[in-house]
Image (spheres, rainbow, N blue to C red):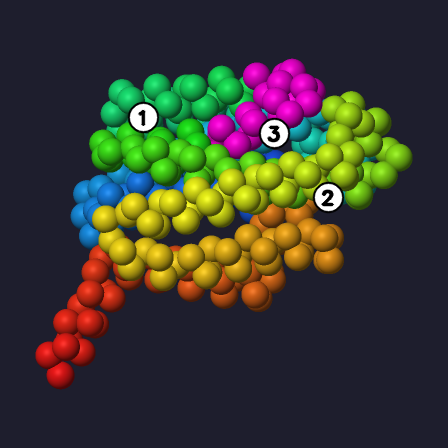
Amino acid sequence: MYKILDFMRYSEIDRMLRRLIVSMRPKQWYKNLILFVGIVFSMNLMDPGMGFTVILAFVIFCMLSGSEYIINDIIDLEKDRMHPIKRNRPIASGKLKIPLALLFATLLIICVGVGSWLINARFLAISIIYLILILLYSLFLKHIIIVDLLVISIGFVIRAVAGCLAIDVFISPWLIICTFLLALFLVLGKRRHELILLGDETKNHRKVLEEYSTEMLDQMISITTSALIISYLMYTFIANNIYMMLTIPFAIYGIFRYLFLIHSRNIGGEPEMLFKDKGMLVCMISWGVLAVGVLYGIPGMVIRVMGGI
């Protein structure tokens, strides 16, 4: 009898832990990979000390993001219950109690503060700024048209800057511009998908969605796409390494492929779905491998070897 009770108790704990982890949305932690951009483009990828620091910073931001996802789910509880997908989340479905979720989120934030302080003071400061920004977004900024898009995009910029501050490297203006425009590009695609998915139910989910229209978002996407492509082209043209221009076709293909997916296949509500598209996945891997290869001198080495032959 006692063994059965112990098993039931541990099973319940296991279910609670699983629900807490699901509420942290680990599927969206890939967004924090942008913290590695600083170490890659500052030519310090081979430095083991910096590499360890960035990995620690990545883990900290995953914890920070997870805590804020939990808090956001608590704030949006009633609205999420009317959403066809979000109503299945642990908090919205009632499978995870709010007091337990809030306690867990608080513990995560405390761990984030300690971990950030161990890295350095500036990383701690940027982590606090990110936390405050996202909390303000969850409370009221997401209800203001256009501001909601800009805040999410700025959040990505803060992640990229945090990666640079963690290892104390130069923060390039091009990093800020391209990150902001790319994030805005993805967010606009997500908003468009939400409008189509929810249809007449948009007013019951989030009031700000009523103020958007697919035509308006399509115009915003067109403007952002143009600005993103021009910014990336300018970066490759003035970069110290002329071979960065080799990455242009992959970058443009990736942008156009995303546009194709959100218009023809209605993918865009959850950007992580892009990893399931073979064309996009091959493009991203190819761009990443080529960009790293160019930055670390592989094309030049090949040319010198060919010249020696």
Q: Position of residue 85 (x, y in %)?
A: 76, 42
At x 66%, y 28%, the residue is 73
Quarter of the figure with residue 81:
top right
From this view, report whether residue 231 is shown above or below residue 110.
below
Q: Amino acid at mark 2?
A: His
- Is any atom of residue 70 visible in this view? no
Residue assigned mark 3: 149
Asked if residue 308 is positioned above or below residue 286 in the image, the reply reads below
Give the amino acid at mark 1: Phe
Proximity of marks 2 and 3: CB atoms separated by less than 8 Å: no
Question: Which range is magenta?
Answer: 136-156
Q: Please identify the dominant SS of the magenta region.
A: helix
For marks 2 and 3, the one nearer the N-term is 3
Badge 3 element: helix
Along the line of sight, the residue nearer the viewer: 136 or 181:
181
Please identify, in this view, whether the residue under mark 1 or under mark 2 is nearer the observer. 2
User: Which label sits on residue 123?
Assistant: 1
- The crowding category of the residue bearing disc 3, from other C-alpha atoms within 10 Å (few below 14, some 14 to 19, many at least 20), is some
Q: Nearer the viewer, residue 79 or 234?
A: 234
Q: Residue at x 80, y 43 (%)?
A: 196
Residue kind at label 3, given as amino acid type: Leu
Residue at 38%, 45% in the rendered image: 234
Give the residue pinned by disc 2: 193
